[in-house]
Amino acid sequence: MAEVLLEVKNLVKHFGARKAFLEPVRRPVRAVDGISFSVRRLETFGLVGESGCGKSTTGFCIARVDDPTAGEVYFEGMDILKLGATEMRGIRRHIQMVFQDPHSSLDPRMTVLKSVGAPLLIHGLATRRDVREKVLRLLEMVGLGVQHLDRYPHQFSGGQKQRLGIARALALNPELVILDEPTSALDVSVQAQILNLLRRLQSELGLSYIFISHNLGVVRYLSHRTAVMHLGKIVELGPTPVLFARPRHHYTRALLSAIPVPNPRHDGAEIILKGDLPSPSRPPSGCRFHTRCDAASALCAEKEPDLREVGEDHLAACHAPL
Amino acid sequence: MNAANLLEIHGLHLYFDTYLGTVRAVEGLDLTVSRGETVGLVGESGCGKSVSALAILGLISQPPGRIAGGKILFKGEDLLKKSPAELRNIRGKYISMIFQEPMSSLNPVYRVGDQMVEVIMLHRRVSRGEARKIALEMLHEVQMPDPEAVMQKYPFEMSGGMLQRVMIAMELSGKPDLLLADEPTTALDVTVQAQILRLMKNLVKKMNASVLLITHDLGVVAQTCDRVAVMYAGQVVEVAPTEELFTDPRHPYTRGLMGCFPDPNRQDAELAAIEGTVPDLINPPGGCRFHPRCPRAGDICGKEGPGPVAISDDHVVHCFFARQASDDHSEGGTGKGVAVLG
C-alpha cells in the first residue's frame, strides 16, 4: 500500500455555537461531525456529496483556511492543527488549494504576473528579477503564454481564470493540492480541458489531490478512492471503481442512481429519495440518513452506525449494508 | 404552419446593442415544438438558449435588446406582433416559464400561498376561495408534503427543491399549453433533481402540455426529451429525435459535447475536450461559427455558413460534412454516443 501523505482523524467543525460571551447558546451547524480518512501519496482522493454535506468545509479545515473545532490533521506525520501561524506558513507551501469560483479567487486589480508571482515572492522562491520568468514557466505549464503575463483577470474567460488559479496553486511546488469544485463554474467543453490538465499535471509533478465535487461523473473519472459524505459524516469510502460499481451504503446507491445518464435508452433513476436533506443543525438521531432510507429499521433511528470494513479497502457506515 | 406544431420559430435574429458593439446573440434560429412534445434546447453558456426562451414570452427589454428579424408563431399567431396587453394574457395562461433560481423567482416578502392565489385569480378568473382550492390541489399534485402549511410559508423558509415544486405548481396552475423550463434543476442537488425531473415529466404528460427544456446537461436531455436542438454561438447546429442524436450525432460540436462527459468504461482515456473557447458574439467568426474550434473544418467552413442538411425526416444538421460524418465515429473518441449506448 502506498505511503500515507495526509491523515485526518475525527475532524469536527461546528459553526456559530456562540458568537459573543453573553449571547445565548445557539444550536450549532454541525458542518463536519467527526470524520477520519487518509490520503496516499500520488493519489486523487475524491470527496463527494450534496450541498451542505461538509465536503468544502473539510477542505478548508485541512488547508487551515478555517480552524476546525476539534480533531487532528497529520501531514507527513506532523499534526498541523497544533502549529502556530509562522510554522503553518512553512507547511502551507506543501498544501495548496484551488477554489470553485475562478472569478472571485483572483484579485481584479492585480495582473497575472502579480497574482501568480505573489506566493513565489512571499516564500522567497523567486526574486524581483527572475519572478517574471518563473511565472511564465508556470503559465506554460497550464497552457497559457507570455501574452497573458500582464493582463488583468477580467480579460480572461472562466476556463482561463481557472488555469490561473491552478498555476498559482502550483507556484510553490506543493505535494498536496485541494481542489474544491474546480470545474463546477465552467461549461462542459472547458471542464473537460481542465480535467485533462489536472490529470497531466498530477503525473508530471507527482501531486496528490483531494478532489471535492458534487459531480459524481467527474469524481469517478479523476479519483482513485472516493469518500461519500452526508450531513457531516463519511458514509462510505472505497476504491472508486468498486464504490461506483457496487455501492454498499443506501445513500451512495441513491446518489448514483440519481445521476442523469446521457443515454436515452437508460431507464432513469430507479431509486428516488423522498423529501429533502435534513438540516445539519438538527441532524436526525442514529443514522443521519434513516429518515430518507428505504431499509431503515428501529435500530437505525437509535444507534449511529460506525464506519466498518465491508470489503477490501472499503468502508461503509450502515447497519444493513447492501 | 403545420397544425400539429404548437410553436414555430422561423429565422429569429436577436441582437443586443452594447457600448462595445452589437452582440449577435441569436442568429437565424429555427425551432418547432409540437403538441404534447418535450423538446430540449442544449448548449453552453452564452449560446443564446435562454434569451430565445425569453423572446418567446416577449421578455427581452428593448433596448438594449432588438429583434432584428424572424417570426415566433404560437398556435399560428406571431407573438412578435402582439401588444403588451395581449402578451400579458398569454404569459402564464398559455405559455409559462420556470426559471433556474426558484429563490429569486418568488417574491421574498409575500407568503407562497398568496403568490399562488394571485396568479391563479389573474389567469383563471375565479374567486379568492376558489383560487385557494386550486393552489392546494396543485401543491398536492407536485407531491408537496402538508400543502396547507406550505401556503403559509415565506420563500426563505423553504429549500430549493421545495421552492422549485412551488414554481412548477404555480406555472402549471394556469393549465398552459407550453411550458418553458430554463435550467429548472441546475441549482438543485442530484437526488432532488431526480425527483423534480420525474415530477415534471409525469405532470406534463397528464396535462398534455408541451415543454421546451433548456439545459446544458446532456444527461437531463436524454432522460426527459423527445427531440433535441443543439445550439452553438447563437445558432442551432443540429436537431434530431433524442435517441438518434445520441446514437448518430453528426455535427462535430454535438460529438464534441458528448466526448466531454467522462465515460465510465474508459477511465484512463483523455477526455475529448473541445479546444479553444466560445467565440465573442460581437465579432463572431465568419462562415460556420464553430469552424475555429472544429477538428474537421475545411476551407469552405470559414467562408460560408452551412445550410441545413437533412439526414432523415427530422434529423437536420448544419455542417458541410454532415453526410460523411458517420464514417469516422472512432476518430478522436468522438463516437461517444455509441460507446455509451453499448
Image (spheres, rainbow, N blue to C red):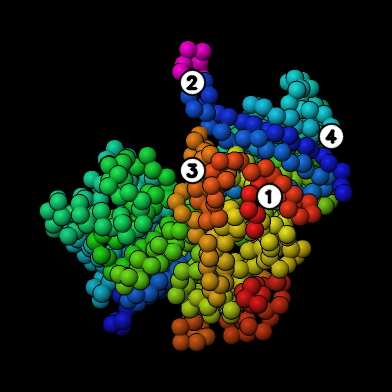
Q: Residue at x 49, y 82 (%)?
A: B315
Give how far apart the Cα atoms at labels 2 and 4 are: 37 Å
Q: Residues within 10 Å of mark 1 (few under 14, many from 20)?
A: many
Residue A52, by quadrant, is top right
Q: Position of residue A38 (x, y in %)?
A: 77, 41
Q: Kindly identify the amino acid type of the residue bearing the numbered disc 1.
A: Ala
Give how far apart the Cα atoms at labels 1 and 3 are: 20 Å
Which chain is indicated by disc 1? Answer: A
Helix, strand, or loop for circle 1?
strand
Q: Position of residue B306 (x, y in %)?
A: 52, 77
The answer to whether marks 2 and 4 sit on the same chain is yes
Q: Is residue A20 magenta?
A: yes
Give how far apart the Cα atoms at labels 4 and 1 are: 26 Å
Callout in the foreground (4, 1): 1
- The residue that disc 3 covers is A278
The answer to whether the residues at label 3 and label 2 have Cβ atoms under 8 Å apart is no
Give how far apart the Cα atoms at labels 1 and 2 are: 34 Å
The answer to whether marks 3 and 2 sit on the same chain is yes
Callout in the foreground (1, 3): 1
- Span colored in magenta: A19-25
Give how far apart the Cα atoms at labels 3 and 2 are: 21 Å
Helix, strand, or loop for circle 4?
loop
Q: Is residue A145 magenta?
A: no
Q: Position of residue B197 (x, y in %)?
A: 44, 62
Q: Residue at x 24, y 54 (%)?
A: B135
Which chain is indicated by disc 3? Answer: A
- The residue that disc 1 covers is A316
Earlier residue among tags 4 and 1: 4
- The residue that disc 4 covers is A76
